[in-house]
Structure formats: C-alpha cells, structure tokens
Amino acid sequence: MLIQAGSLLSMEGPPRSPAVVRIAGNQIAEVESAELRVKKKGEEPVLDLSRFVLLPGFVNAHSHLELTAIGPIDGKPDFVSWIRQLVKKKTLLDPEEQKKGIREGVKKFINSGVTTIGDQISFNTEWEEITGSPLRGRLFGEVLGILPEICADIYSTFKQIKEQLSATDSLFKMHISPHSVYAVHPLVLEKILENEPPPLSCHLAESLAEEDYFKRKGGELMKFIQERGIDAPHQGISGLDVLFRLNLNLSSLMIVHGNYLNSSDQALIEKNNLSLVHCPGSHAYFGHRPFPLEKYLSCGFNVALGTDSLASNLKLDFLEELRLVKKTHPSLSASTILEMATLTGAKALKMENQIGSITPGKKADMIGFKWDGKTAPEDIVLKADQVDFVMIDGKIVRYLDGEQFVRNLNS
Ligand SMILES: [Zn+2]
C-alpha cells in the first residue's frame, strides 16, 4: 500500500511536504519524495492522506492500564495516603471491572495517537486484555513486596506469565521489573537486576516521601513499610544509591518519574546512559516540585513521556500530556516534544530498532492529523484534540472519514 502524506514528520530529518510511504505487510518499505506516487499509482492501493500530517505513533512509556477502572483518587492526597487508598481500591476491584477499564484505557490511548505502551502489571492483572489489544509494547511485571518470601513468590508468578505470553503472537513482550527500590527486598532486587533482560521499568525518586525514606530514614513511607513487620532493609541515600551500593549493573534500568533526583543520581544516569520517563499529568496531580526538563535535555538525558495511570492523572490522553509539557516548559520546541513522544520513547523501551520513526525496515506504526496545509505540521499535532488516523503493525485501527477506504481494503 502507498500512503500519500501532505506532510511527513519521520523523526529523521526535517519535515517532508509532501511525501509517500510504502507499506509492505507490517513494515515500512520505502519513504520517498512525492514523485513516487505518480510512477507507482495503480499498482497497489493508495491511501490519500494528502491533507494530513503523518508521523510515527506515540510511545507512552509508562502506564498502568489495570488501574483505569479505579479512576483518580479524590482529595489530592499526599503520596503515601494515595498508596494506601490505591491498595484498598485495587483489592476491591472486580476482574470484569478491571477488564472493562483496560479496554477503555486502550481506546483512550489509541484515540490520542498512542501505538506503543510500556505498561506495568501486577501478578494478578487480567494481562491478556492488554496483550490482545491492537497496541504494541512492553509489559512490565511489577515485582513488589518488602518481605522477601512474598516478593520471591510474585517474581516466580511473573516468570510463568512471561512464558505464557511468549507462546502467543501478541505484539507485547514481558519484562520482569522491580516496582521501585523501596518496595522490593534487596535480595530480590539483586536477582532481578542480575537476571532479567533490559529494559527494567522502576519507579525512582518519585516523591518527597521516598526522599524522606532513603535520606532521613523516616516519614510516612517508612511507617508504611514498618507496618509490614520488617525494619527498612535498604542501605543508601536514594533508590539508585541503594542499587549502586549493592554493586549491581544499573544499565538495564528505565527510571520512571525521577522527580527528586539528587546530583549523584544524575551522575549515575549520565554514566549508565539511563532513560527517564517523565509523566506530566501525574506530576501535576501530586503537585511535585518543578521538573527540570530543560536541564535534563541539555545534559543529553533520554527523557520519554508517560501518562501513568488514571489513579493519578485526570485523563488518559497522550495529546494532553504533550500540551502539558508545552505549558510547563514553553521554551521547548514542538519538534523536541514530538521527538520525546516518539523516538525517545522507543529508545527508553529499547524498541528503537522496531519503532519510533518512519524509516524503511521499521514496523508500520503511524498516526495522522488533518492539516490545513499552512500551519507548521508540528504545531498541528500539539493543537489537536484527537488523532484522525492510526495504523499499528500495518493495520488501520482508526481512520475518521475513511471507513469506506478501510472496507474496500479489507474486502
Ligand atoms: Zn507508575
């Protein structure tokens, strides 16, 4: 199939207006200047998106679809009260409600241009609802438990799920990861970091409560952990510092949040070339201190974007996350923000060989926005309140005004 695009933001080089992309199966076969369409028209189906801006699908590097049904926890609670309420609500959640929430979340992601996710799951999540969706991505099995035996049990459950998933033809791969450092016993942290292939998604330096726990050995998070009947077993002044002191290889980590990174954490990120996932909506929900995004980008950090879950975000709308970044960091250009939303996200999930740019050989995951032909293509994306075209793995999963084309294609 040939796709004629009004403007192509391939994430490799400047915009091309117009351009033609050839899809072969589930892959991008060719990306060319507009002349190709004249030569090859008539030989294969042509999808006319000449009034659209086309770009790679968005990568939402951090989500928890399983929490969609829970929704935002009311009352702007502090971080640890939020965890307490979340744990309670999660226990009461019926599996059918959870599945319904996952389906709604997937829909919200696709409608806002997300084609790949890095989604966290618990050991008892209805994960097949996620892997059976049209999306692509990583499924991060969150190992959680401060008591070593509980933690080890969850780890082995995830190993079974990983095996089950690898026997399917889903577009997801499972990566067993530590939920965080504070919530996992050091013995199990060691096992995961030594044995599990990258990327390992880990909540790190998320809240002031976490900072209090490591740095001052006190606060609400310390109380919460002590209630589990164990003395806080971690040695170090931050989550990353604990792992460093255990002499573990940090290079597999993908740091989620990083709202309160100290200078030695930042040095470890630089040394190990670690990716960070910033979650603008969740950051605003908790009212964390301003995120030093400009500084991190100028240091060369790979900063991707995530929605986090609906339990700590008012919407599951990736376009809203892009607008939030622009609002809180107005000096960033639209093209920098779009790169964070695509190629950088792909690098964070270690999927840049498959997705993140419109490049021959990569998977055909693309999104399109209607375009007036005048406005800068990048600006159209940041102003849009929905996506008009979505293709994942070479299949059209959303095409407003193009149902007839899709019907003809499938007939
Ligand atoms: Zn999270």
Image (tube, rainbow, N blue to C red):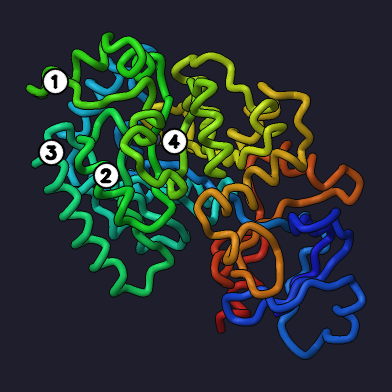
Q: Report if residue 400 is visible in the image.
A: no
- In this rendering, the label closer to the viewer, 2 or 3: 2
Task: Please state which amino acid type lies under the numbered disc 3.
Answer: Pro
In the foreground, 263 or 109? 263
**Which tag, 2 or 1, sits closer to the chain's start?**
2
In the foreground, 43 or 253? 253
Task: Please state which amino acid type lies under the numbered disc 1.
Answer: Asp
Q: Which mark is residue 308?
A: 4
Q: Which mark is residue 148?
A: 3
Q: Quadrant of residue 365?
A: bottom right
Task: Please state which amino acid type lies under the numbered disc 2.
Answer: Glu
Tell me what residue is drawn at x 33 percent, y 48 percent.
193
Secondary structure of residue under mark 1: loop
Locate ligand 1 by image quadrant.
Answer: top left
Neighbor class of circle 4 (other Cα within 10 Å; few <14, some 14-19, many 20+) is many
Neighbor class of circle 2 (other Cα within 10 Å; few <14, some 14-19, many 20+) is some
Which residue does the numbered mark 2 point to in the structure image? Answer: 190
In the rendered image, which quarter contains the C terminus?
A: bottom right
Position in image of residue 100 (x %, y %): 30, 47
Question: Is residue 380 found left or right of 83 in the rendered image?
Answer: right
Position in image of residue 46 (x %, y %): 75, 78
In the rendered image, which quarter contains the N terminus?
A: bottom right
| C-alpha separation, residue under disc 4 versus residue under disc 2 | 26 Å
| Above or below, 244 relative to 54 | above
Question: Is residue 7 found left or right of 360 in the rendered image?
Answer: right
Farthest-out residue, bottom: 43
**Which tag, 2 or 3, sits closer to the chain's start?**
3
| C-alpha separation, residue under disc 3 versus residue under disc 4 | 27 Å
| C-alpha separation, residue under disc 2 versus residue under disc 3 | 12 Å
**Which tag, 4 or 1, sits closer to the chain's start?**
1
Task: Please state which amino acid type lies under the numbered disc 4.
Answer: Asp
Q: Quadrant of residue 267?
A: top right
